């Protein structure tokens, strides 16, 4: 039941533009038919990258995917396993979050 | 923007528009779900409503 045909891709963005690129791609996914993007992940720890879950191959030559500050698909990133993605979904609390005073 | 302390949905409100629980300014990480039916990530986190979520909230 939890099986889907989606693949996780790592995309390179300009530094500091991770959230903007994610929001622009999400808008395209919602408004353009045939873009198979179902989720976009912007972990705080990944500077200059976002993770995109898609049922269709992410090919930046597709004009529908033209987004400012999107730099490219990380080669070999097609093999990102879901287990690797899971650790971004449930980040461990950081030590400095221990109660102050 | 703020994040719901329970379902992690991001909004500008003091109470979550989705589940009504209090929101917090102290959050990090961004997750956009555009198609919960097709998303393995959404299924893993039991998210059924498209939208913006945080990854961590306190
Ligand atoms: Zn909520």
Image: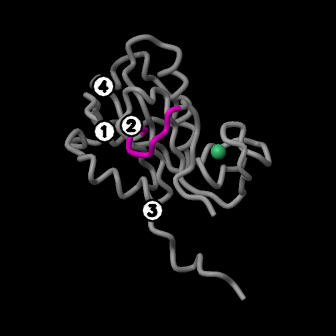
Q: Which residue is mark 2?
A: A52
Identify the element where label 1 is drawn.
Answer: strand
- The crowding category of the residue bearing disc 2, from other C-alpha atoms within 10 Å (few below 14, some 14 to 19, many at least 20), is many
Query: Furthest residue to the bottom?
Result: A101
Contact between marks 1 and 3 (CB within 8 A): the answer is: no
- The label on residue A8 is 1
- The answer to whether residue A55 is magenta is no
Callouts 4 and 1 in the same chain: yes
Q: Which color scheme does this rendered protein use?
A: one colour
Identify the element where label 4 is drawn.
Answer: loop
Residue beneath the point at 29% across and 42% down:
A74
For marks 1 and 3, give the one nearer the viewer: 3
Q: Chain letter of disc 4? A: A
Q: Is residue B47 left or right of residue B1?
A: left
Q: Which residue is mark 4?
A: A55
- The label on residue A91 is 3
* Res B40 → quadrant: top left
**For this rendering, which residue is in front, B40 or A88?**
B40
Region in magenta? B42-48
- Which comes before the other along the chain, label 1 or label 2? 1
Contact between marks 1 and 2 (CB within 8 A): the answer is: yes
- The crowding category of the residue bearing disc 4, from other C-alpha atoms within 10 Å (few below 14, some 14 to 19, many at least 20), is some
Ligand 1 contact, mark 3 (Cβ < 8 Å): no
Ligand 1 contact, mark 1 (Cβ < 8 Å): no
In this rendering, the answer to whether B12 lies above or below A45 is above
Identify the element where label 3 is drawn.
Answer: loop
């Amino acid at each position: 039941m939890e099986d889907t045909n989606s693949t996780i891709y790592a995309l390179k963005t300009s530094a500091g533009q991770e959230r903007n690129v994610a929001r622009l791609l999400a808008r395209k996914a919602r408004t353009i038919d045939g873009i198979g993007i179902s989720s976009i992940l912007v972990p705080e720890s990944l500077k200059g990258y976002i993770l995109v879950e898609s049922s269709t191959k992410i090919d930046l030559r597709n004009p529908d995917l033209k987004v400012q500050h999107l730099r490219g698909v990380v080669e070999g990133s097609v093999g990102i396993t879901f287990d690797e993605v899971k650790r971004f979904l449930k980040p461990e609390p950081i030590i400095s979050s221990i109660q102050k005073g | 923007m703020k994040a719901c302390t329970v379902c992690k949905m991001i909004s500008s409100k003091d109470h979550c528009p989705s589940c009504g629980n209090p929101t917090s300014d102290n959050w990090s990480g961004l997750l956009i779900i555009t198609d919960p039916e097709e998303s393995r990530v959404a299924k893993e986190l039991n998210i059924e409503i498209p939208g913006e979520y945080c990854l961590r909230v306190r």
